[in-house]
């Protein structure tokens, strides 16, 4: 009988410790990454500046599964978690997803979608 109580307490502790981790993973799944808190990722800049690093040939290219949009601040939150969508922001920019063969191929049905 004492063994059952110990198992019950251990189980309760495991659940108590695992629940916040599971909730955190669930709450953040499918969300766009937050922007780093540096000058290169200021929400006051134009989205075209983002493409300087996040082109296919850039230092940090977007993944193939990236949504077919170039209005970065509609999905990516600042380092505090605040979203800064811009009314009328272009969803397609020069050198953006339409000019990226991997992403544009998805739009034409040639690649994997999200």
Image: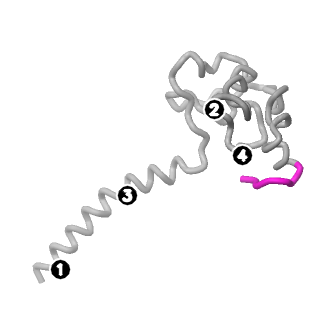
Between the C-alphas of marks 1 and 2, the distance is 53 Å
Quarter location, residue 6: bottom left
Determine whether label 2 and label 3 are within 8 Å by CB. Answer: no
For this orientation, the residue located farthest to the left is 2
Q: Position of residue 88 (x, y in %)?
A: 81, 26
Nearest to N terminus: mark 3 or mark 4: 3
Nearest to N terminus: mark 1 or mark 2: 1
Between the C-alphas of marks 3 and 1, the distance is 22 Å
Q: Nearer the viewer, mark 1 or mark 2?
A: 2
Q: Position of residue 65 (x, y in %)?
A: 70, 48
Between the C-alphas of marks 3 and 4, the distance is 32 Å
Q: Is residue 101 left or right of residue 19?
A: right
Q: Position of residue 1 (x, y in %)?
A: 12, 83
Residue at which label 3 appears: 19
Residue at which label 4 appears: 64
Label 3, secondary structure: give it.
helix
Magenta run includes residue 112? yes
Quarter location, residue 47: top right
Nearest to N terminus: mark 3 or mark 1: 1
Q: Report the magenta residues as a range.
A: 108-114
Mark 2 Cα shell of 10 Å, populated few (<14), some (14-19), many (≥20): few
Which dot marks residue 4? 1
Residue at which label 2 appears: 60
Label 4, secondary structure: give it.
loop
Between the C-alphas of marks 2 and 3, the distance is 34 Å
């Amino acid at each position: 009988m004492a063994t059952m109580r110990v198992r019950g307490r251990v189980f309760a502790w495991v659940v108590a410790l695992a629940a916040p981790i599971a909730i955190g993973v669930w709450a953040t799944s499918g969300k766009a990454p937050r922007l780093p808190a540096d000058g290169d990722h200021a929400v006051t800049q134009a989205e075209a500046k983002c493409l300087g690093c996040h082109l296919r040939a850039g230092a940090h290219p977007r993944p193939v599964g990236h949504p077919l949009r170039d209005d970065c601040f509609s999905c990516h939150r600042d380092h505090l978690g605040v979203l800064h969508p811009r009314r009328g922001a272009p969803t397609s920019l020069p050198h953006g997803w339409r000019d990226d063969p991997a992403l544009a191929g998805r739009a034409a049905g040639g690649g994997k979608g999200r």
